Image (cartoon, grey):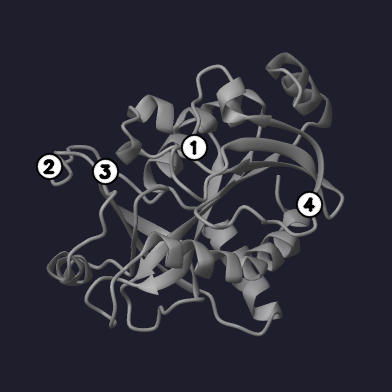
Amino acid sequence: MPPFPAFESAVRASQPRVAVVLGSGLGSVPHHFVELASIAFADVPGLATPSVHGHSGSISLGTCVDRPLLVFRGRLHFYEGHPWDLVIQPVRLMAKWRVKTLLLTNAAGGIHDSLGPGELMVLRDHLFLQTPHSWRVVTQPRTAPYSPRLMELLQEAKKQHGRHLMAGVYAAVTGPCYETPAEIRALKAIGADAAGMSTAAEAQAAVAVGLEVAALSCITNKAAGLSAGVLDHREVLANAARHAERISELLETILPRLG
């Protein structure tokens, strides 16, 4: 792998305007990506190596459908013990490199009745429940960080492949343990359609630095209490990898219209 200055020079020369962050088990996305250079998170000033299985922790520069693209293979999570500044540092890097559009992906547990393993959900909003003061009174109005234009592009692309793409609300919880059945019932009661442990802070940080953002959840399991069996991270990774082709299809369909 090249040292960071050489990698950064390659990025500036290629001028990618689109970046993708890949969640648990989705490291093979996009399938038709041609890599030109790659660097480990550990070799990037201000980043760290992920400790979560299924997050290789590297940044790849390359092309996909003849467009330059940055692919972040994995992310850093708050539950790993990282401060929020470190969790969102990849977003700051993207802005520094003049990326304009960000597609976030994650593996999530389905709460909505129609979201079972293998389904995809595009985020229209989220519940940010990852701080001790998640329910504090907000004195300034806030809007969802997810771009309606990008959401529509993803839904149109999904139709081209013969399926409906649900737009839903993602509950970002702290983790790393899975929620209890009672907690899932509470999340459903306040409007959550899926639950996971990432994405929301990155989306908010991206909008704050001027990026247009979309996010996709790959539903890898029914959330706790909504199916038989015990939740297991190995199952999450296996199901995400099995359905990565669908995310690749959507990305490769909309990429020519991004940036």
- Picture mark count: 4
**Viewer-nearest of labels 2 and 4?**
4
The CA distance from mark 3 to mark 4 is: 40 Å
**Viewer-nearest of labels 3 and 4?**
4
Relative horizontal placement of residue 123, taking residue 102 as reference (left or right):
left
Closer to the camera in the image, 142 or 25? 25
**Viewer-nearest of labels 1 and 3?**
1
Give, as a three-letter code, the residue at label 3.
Answer: Pro
Q: Are marks 2 and 3 in contact (CB under 8 Å)?
A: no
Disc 1 residue crowd, few under 14, some 14–19, many 20+, Cα 10 Å: many
Residue 122 in sight: no
The CA distance from mark 1 to mark 4 is: 23 Å
Quadrant (top left/top right/bottom left/bottom right) for the N terminus: top right
Q: Which residue corresponds to mark 2? A: 137
Residue extending furthest right? 66
Mark 4 element type: loop
Which of the two labelled residues, at mark 1 and mark 3, occupies the earlier sequence position? 3
- Relative image position of residue 162 (x, y in whole percent): 66, 85
Q: For residue 205, what is the image quadrant?
A: top left
Q: Which residue corresponds to mark 1? A: 206
The CA distance from mark 1 to mark 3 is: 18 Å
Give, as a three-letter code, the residue at label 1.
Answer: Ala
- Relative image position of residue 155 (x, y in whole percent): 59, 71
- Relative image position of residue 73 (x, y in whole percent): 60, 44
Q: Which residue corresponds to mark 3? A: 141
The CA distance from mark 2 to mark 3 is: 11 Å
Relative horizontal placement of residue 175, taking residue 249 as reference (left or right):
left
Which of the two labelled residues, at mark 1 and mark 2, occupies the earlier sequence position? 2
Which of the two labelled residues, at mark 1 and mark 4, occupies the earlier sequence position? 4
Disc 4 residue crowd, few under 14, some 14–19, many 20+, Cα 10 Å: many
Q: Is residue 92 above or below residue 211?
A: above
Identify the mark at residue 33; answer none if there is no mark. Answer: 4
